[in-house]
Every structure is written in C-alpha cells, then in structure tokens.
C-alpha cells in the first residue's frame, strides 16, 4: 500500500522551511496524513540551494521546497537551539513556557503538538540526534537531578523515542515504521546534526573554490577556499 506523507523540512537556528504534501486522488476528506518532521541544526537560510546558493548543494532540501511550499518570511521564536525547538513543539513563546536556557527541560505541564496528535490516534515518535527538550545530556549531575525529580518527560509524551546521532537517524526511522500500527496514522520527528559543527572530515573530497575569479589565486587561495567550503557544508550524504 502506498504511504502518504505530509513532509516538513525545517532548518534552524535561523529558520528556512519547505512543506511538501503528497496525496492520492483516491484520498477522502477524512483521511489523516502521516507527518514527517525533518530538522537540521544551526542551519541558516542563505546556506541552501533553494534560496539561491550555488556553491552549497542541498538537493534533498531543495526538493522539499520545489514540491511544496518555500517560506521567505519565516523566523524562529528565538535565535538559539533549545528555545526554538520548544517553540516548534508547542507553538508558544519560549519566554512564556520558561524555555530560555539551553539546558532547560520542557515543563511537564506544557503540552506539545505530538501529544495532541497522539490523543487523536496518531502513533508518535522522535529519533536521531539529541532533541534537546529533556535537559542537557552532557552533564551527569544534571541528569541525576532530572531523573530524580521526574523532569525528563518525553518518554511519556510520545510512543517511540531514540536519542543517538544522525548516522542512526534512518535506521531508527525504519525501526519506528516497523513498529507503527498499520491502522494508525503516524508522526515522526527526525533530527540531524548537520550542518552543526564539528563537520565531517572529507565530506567534500574536492570542494569547489569559492574564490574563483577573485584576486586570491594559487595554492594558498585554493586552501582558503577549501576551508570556507567545509565551514559552510550544508548537505551531508545521508541527508
């Protein structure tokens, strides 16, 4: 059976998003779509092919934009990772829900939209790199406090949760789809690290010179151009 998706590609911290909806002519008005939210990290709008950058290659994200809706005046609620993710999940101001600190867990009483979907019969999940809304994962003392006082809440908010890295994102997505009940629509939030640093070594074997036609030439100029290309690498092979 053909799977029908509503796909949202969102890139943050400074947001650029593409929305693609595919549907069959046989769909009925009451059919509920599957929803896949793909989130890249620290990804600003100028570093996408669909916004006119010819040096950075983002073919899959460009396809989202070409087949769906590309936003030219869309902004995150806060120019920082955790507060902006909280706003994505809740539709609320980070200040209003006490999510202004990088390591803050989302308060249990603040409802997320995956919970609303779950209440309407959706099978819901999160996978890939750390999604940042259950507190800082890098501090053992913080983790002990979060667990002691029940501040890590997302395992209760969704049906499926995995926290790893972007190399595991697609295997985890397949695991989610294998577990998804066939009689339910699903929502899945897939998180990627790229283009957040550190960057993958040799991801671009021979980066195109960004300085072609400029006064900077020769071997030194090529080295600088290579560093610039790696700095703004925005589409890894698995994205």
Image (cartoon, grey):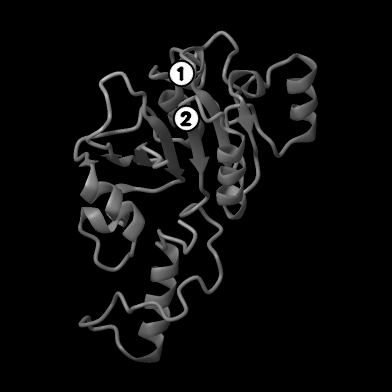
Q: Is residue 5 left or right of residue 133?
A: left
Q: Mark 1 falls on what kind of element? A: helix
Residue 136 rendering spot, x and y as whole percentages: 66, 33
- Pick the quarter of the image with the N terminus: top left
Q: Residues within 10 Å of mark 1 (few under 14, many from 20)?
A: some
Pinpoint residue 119: horizontal percent, then vertical percent.
50, 12
Query: Disc 2 marks which residue?
Result: 187
Residue drawn at 63 percent across, 26 percent down: 134
Residue 127 % position (x, y): 58, 39
Residue 117 numbered mark, or none: 1
Residue at x 36%, y 29% (from the top left corner):
33
| Residue 131 visible in image | no
Quadrant of the snapshot with the C terminus: bottom left
Tell me the tag on residue 52.
none
> Answer yes or no: do the residues labelled 2 and 1 have beta carbons within 8 Å?
yes
Q: Hey, which residue is sitting farthest bottom in the picture?
A: 218
What residue is at 61 percent from the left and 25 percent from the top? 159
């Amino acid at each position: 059976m053909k799977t029908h998706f509503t796909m949202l590609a969102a890139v943050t911290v400074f947001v650029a998003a593409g929305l693609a909806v595919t549907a069959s002519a046989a769909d009925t008005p009451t059919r509920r779509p599957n929803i896949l939210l793909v989130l890249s990290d620290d990804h600003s709008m100028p570093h996408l092919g669909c916004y006119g950058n010819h040096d950075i290659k983002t073919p899959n994200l460009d396809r989202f934009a070409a087949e769906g809706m590309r936003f030219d005046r869309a902004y995150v609620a806060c120019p920082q990772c955790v507060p902006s993710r909280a706003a994505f999940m809740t539709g609320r101001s980070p200040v209003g829900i006490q999510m202004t600190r990088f390591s803050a867990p989302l308060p249990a009483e603040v409802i997320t939209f995956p919970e609303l979907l779950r209440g309407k019969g959706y099978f819901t999940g999160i996978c890939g790199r750390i999604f940042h809304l259950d507190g800082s994962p890098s501090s053992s003392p913080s983790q002990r406090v979060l667990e002691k006082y029940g501040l890590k809440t997302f395992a209760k908010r969704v049906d499926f949760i995995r926290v790893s890295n972007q190399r595991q994102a697609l295997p985890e997505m397949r695991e989610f789809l294998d577990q998804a009940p066939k009689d339910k629509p699903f929502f899945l939030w897939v998180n990627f690290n790229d283009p957040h640093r550190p960057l993958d070594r040799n991801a671009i074997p021979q980066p195109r010179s960004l300085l072609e036609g400029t006064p900077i030439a020769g071997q030194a100029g090529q080295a600088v151009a290579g560093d610039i290309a790696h700095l703004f690498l925005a589409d890894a092979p698995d994205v």
